[in-house]
């Protein structure tokens, strides 16, 4: 699990661990910021750095030998218009949303065998970007294309690759940023975690290359 120190990451780690799965929590933050339910906590991992990512997954291999699933939650968001924004924002969002997933997938594949599953976090905004969402939607669209391409490449090996496309997730930060919104329409972390857990499980054995919209009541 990448991005395990965030609100969604922590919830998904707890959700999977409660179901009996030993979860490795990976994040750029320190070890003590990671969920205590994790079987192994790897903090300080910069997933935008391919060599650093490879070292983290080598540590996972040393501890467990192999992995059955990978959930790429690491990422970020920024709102700014195309006209008044900065090119650096496009580069930053591409790095934290796309490169992190790419590097984690590449590092994880040698540790996975038939029956393995990868779940990436895309965004419903990737289908149609609204004002201020250009850089974010473009990076999440790239995540969707990465998911499709990798799913096609790995079919013969029996490894599945899917993405979830959430709308606004009900988190304290989003509530603070949009205090006048109808929070009841947003996707809860529990709802999103349920879909992620399904896609990474054997119950979704016939699903690969899918982009699953999880848009709540928006």
Image (cartoon, grey):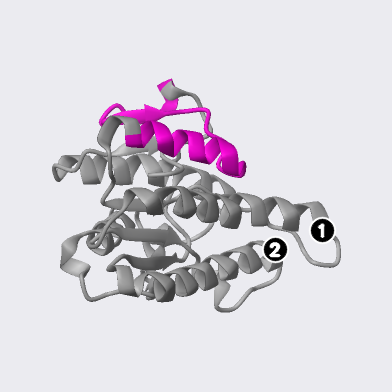
**Left or right relative to 83: residue 211:** left
Residue 194's quadrant in the figure?
Answer: bottom left
**Where does the image place residue 98, in percent across and percent down from the top left?**
58, 57
Q: Secondary structure at mark 1?
A: loop
Ranked by sequence position, the earlier of labels 2 and 1 is 1
The quadrant in which the C terminus is found is: bottom left
Q: Secondary structure at mark 2?
A: helix
The residue at the far right in this view is 84
User: Relative to residue 113, is residue 23 depicted above or below?
Assistant: above
* Residue for badge 1: 85
Q: Residue at x 40, y 49 (%)?
A: 108
Where, quadrant-wise, is the N terminus in this rendering?
A: top left
Instruction: Point out residue 181 in the picture as x, y percentages from the top left corner.
Output: 51, 60
Nearer to us in this view, 69 or 106: 106
Q: Residue at x 31, y 46 (%)?
A: 12
Q: Are marks 2 and 1 in contact (CB under 8 Å)?
A: yes
Does the stretch in magenta take in 37? yes
Residue 58 bears which disc, if any? none
Q: Nearer the viewer, residue 33 or 154?
A: 154
Q: CA distance from mark 2 to mark 1?
A: 9 Å
Front disc: 2 or 1: 2
x, y percentage for residue 190?
A: 28, 53
Q: Which residue is mark 2?
A: 135
* Residues drawn in magenta: 32-61
Residue 82, image x, y percentages: 80, 67
Residue pushed farthest top?
32
Label 2: few (<14), some (14–19) or many (≥20) C-alpha neighbours in 10 Å: many
């Amino acid at each position: 699990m990448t991005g395990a120190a965030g609100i969604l990451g922590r919830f998904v780690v707890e959700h999977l661990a409660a179901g009996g799965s030993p979860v490795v929590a990976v994040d750029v933050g320190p070890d003590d910021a990671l969920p205590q339910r994790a079987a192994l906590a790897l903090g300080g991992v910069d997933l935008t750095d391919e060599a650093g990512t490879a070292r983290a997954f080598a540590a996972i291999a040393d501890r467990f030998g192999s992995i059955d699933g990978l959930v790429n939650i690491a990422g970020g968001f920024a709102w700014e218009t195309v006209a008044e924004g900065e090119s650096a924002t496009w580069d930053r969002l591409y790095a934290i949303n796309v490169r992190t997933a790419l590097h984690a997938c590449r590092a994880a594949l040698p540790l996975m065998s038939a029956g393995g599953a990868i779940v990436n976090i895309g965004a419903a905004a990737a289908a149609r970007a609204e004002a201020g969402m250009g850089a974010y939607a473009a990076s999440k669209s790239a995540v969707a294309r990465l998911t499709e391409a990798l799913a096609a490449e790995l079919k013969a090996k029996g490894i599945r690759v899917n993405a979830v496309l959430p709308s606004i997730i009900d988190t304290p930060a989003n509530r603070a940023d949009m205090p006048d919104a109808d929070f009841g329409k947003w996707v809860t972390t529990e709802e999103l975690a349920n879909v992620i857990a399904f896609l990474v499980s054997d119950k979704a054995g016939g699903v690969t290359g899918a982009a699953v919209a999880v848009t709540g009541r928006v």
